[in-house]
Image (spheres, rainbow, N blue to C red):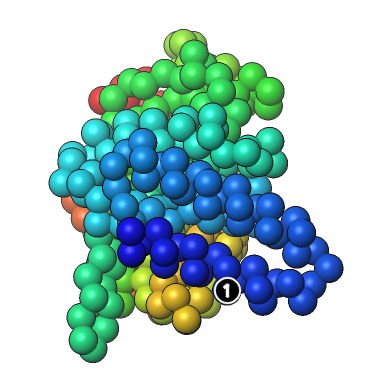
Amino acid sequence: MKQAVKGYFTITLLCFALLLSASCSGTIKTLTDLSRLRNELIQEFKEKDINVVVQGSHVLGISFINSSFNKWGELDRAEKAREIALFAIKHYAAIASINQIRVGFVAAKNYIVFNYSQTLGAYSFNKSDLENPTESKVQGLVNTLYNPSSNQTSVYLNRNLQVYSGRDGGIMMLPYFVVPGNNVSAPRIITPRTAMMDFSTTSTKRMLPDNPPFVLYVDDEKVFSGKARTTSVLGSEGEKSFNEFATQEIPYSQFVQLTNGKKVKIMLGAKELELSGASLEALRTMRRCIEQLKCD
């Protein structure tokens, strides 16, 4: 009951502030739709602490805080995230304006001096992919997904990689490739020109500057540097909760060099992200999936 009152009170305050703008009628409708979806998610999945937001008008974000799903294994959580995203497609009134659905599972604790939160799993789904499930082929650790509308195949991990965890928050990375055509059943998937790396943060304060510098080190040698693009920032100081999203594209040749390394470190802004052995092996599996169609 407290969570429902809190959610309603937050929506009421936000709407009151936005009443000063001419577009408040549209905002009221959006907040009403989000509140209704949140209540339906609570009823369906029997979890009380759920955050629902719209990011940049076209991304629907759903976060389960301290839910029973936190105790599940990675693959089970990934399947549950897909189930939640499919539920949202059927129950969110303004789903026509949404292109992507992001589902996250967060562990949070409140202390006297600070608040701590860690994202245990964050999963991103294109609405068009969910609406064409027969085009998806789950092969093991790596998925391949053909989108007939764009005539492209996406290759991505079943799970996000935890690349940073500290008292100030957590950072997850989701690497993926996009190649032309439907090459899921071909003798060999076309080698991509680039690899994409999406990053998401969970914290009480912002962890990254806008468009943070990105530097990739392999075995202590700098092999790539650039500037990641901030795609969105959710939350506020008042809420003591932030989720930041950034993306970086690197040449596939640098990705190959990364998978050949024994020690890989990424500097994202001021944050040092050192990839664990398990994370490196997951990236090597992605490469084998691309080059040898071995996706286990």
Report the side of 95 relative to 185 (left or right).
right
Report the side of 132 relative to 264 (left or right).
right
Res 9 seen here: yes
3 up-or-down from 257: above or below: below
Q: Residue 246, percent across and down? A: 52, 61
Between 110 and 261, which is closer to the camera in this rendering? Answer: 110
Between 106 and 285, which is closer to the camera in this rendering? Answer: 106
Q: How many marks?
A: 1
204 up-or-down from 26: above or below: below
Quadrant hosting residue 142: top left
291 up-or-down from 217: above or below: above
Amino acid, disc 1: Leu
Report the side of 54 relative to 119 (left or right).
right
Residue, far bottom: 113
Q: Secondary structure at mark 1?
A: helix
Between 36 and 145, which is closer to the camera in this rendering? Answer: 36
Q: Residue at x 47, y 30 (%)?
A: 86
Res 216 seen here: no
Residue, far right: 22
Image quarter hosting the C terminus: top left
Q: Residue 58, percent across and down? A: 65, 48
Quadrant hosting residue 163: bottom left
Q: Residue at x 52, y 52 (%)?
A: 35
Quadrant hosting residue 150: top right
Residue behind mark 1: 13
Q: Residues within 10 Å of mark 1 (few under 14, many from 20)?
A: few
Image quarter hosting the N terminus: bottom left
Q: Residue at x 53, y 46 (%)?
A: 36
Q: Residue 6, percent across and down? A: 41, 67
Q: Residue at x 36, y 71 (%)?
A: 203
